[in-house]
Amino acid sequence: DGVLFNKNCTILLKYPPKKSNTTYRVPDSVLYVEEDAFKCCSHIEEITYCSIIDDSISKIKELEKTKCIVLEDNPLYLETDGVFFSKDKKKLVKYPNTKKDSCYTIPEEVEEIDSYAFKQCDCLTDIVVPKKVTEIKPKSFYFCKKLCNVVFLSEDTVTIHPEGFLANNNVYVFSAAS
């Protein structure tokens, strides 16, 4: 069908940009998706991930407006209301920028917010960060243009990378300790 894989069909190397399908199911044999595999494929509206066992979902940057689905038997990720988490739910991997909610309360099990997790979530204005979060990675809230209030429920120190809120204007951070 024109999709390029490695010899063993365990790595998805490239999806053809001119392929007209709007949905795609990554085959069960695929364990890794190359970072640029879907480059120039903005017409894809939905991708279903079956058994990817690495962190390639969080690296795919080309499909910012694509709905991604993770099946229950995926050993690395789980999806709750369209939001991607590590299987143990300790890491928030990706909040889809297609969601229209203005407020989001991160689940209390989350301890870490991954890089680019909230990239270009233009509808979000308010985020509540639970007590267990100890780290916010670089560019976690990259280009969240309307984000203005971030409330940390933890009274402990949270490590926020200097670029955690890169390219955001007028973000006010509130802490339970203050």
Image: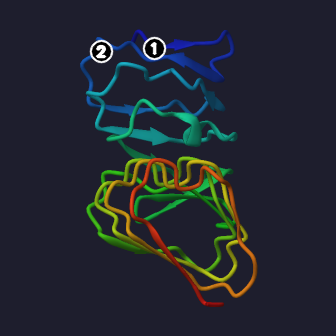
Q: Is residue 14 above or below residue 50?
A: above
Task: For mark 1, give the secondary structure.
Answer: loop
Q: Residue at x 64, y 67 (%)?
A: 89
Q: Residue at x 51, y 41 (%)?
A: 49
Query: Looking at the picture, does residue 11 appear above or below residue 18?
Result: below
Q: Does 134 sit above or below residue 55?
A: below
Whether residue 18 sits left or right of residue 118 in the image: it is: left
Q: Residue at x 65, y 53 (%)?
A: 162
Q: Where is residue 176 drawn, in percent x and y?
A: 60, 90
Residue occupying the point 55% across, 53% down: 140
Q: Which mark is residue 19?
A: 2
Q: Quadrant of residue 95?
A: bottom left
Looking at the rendered structure, the kind of residue marked 1 is Val
Q: As shown in the figure, which amino acid type bears the numbered disc 2? A: Lys
Note whether 147 is above or below 150 in the view shown.
Answer: above
In the rendered structure, are the residues bearing label 2 and label 1 in contact, judged by CB atoms less than 8 Å apart? Answer: yes
The quarter of the rendered structure image containing the N terminus is top left
Residue 91: x percent and y percent? Answer: 65, 61
Residue at the disc numbered 1: 3
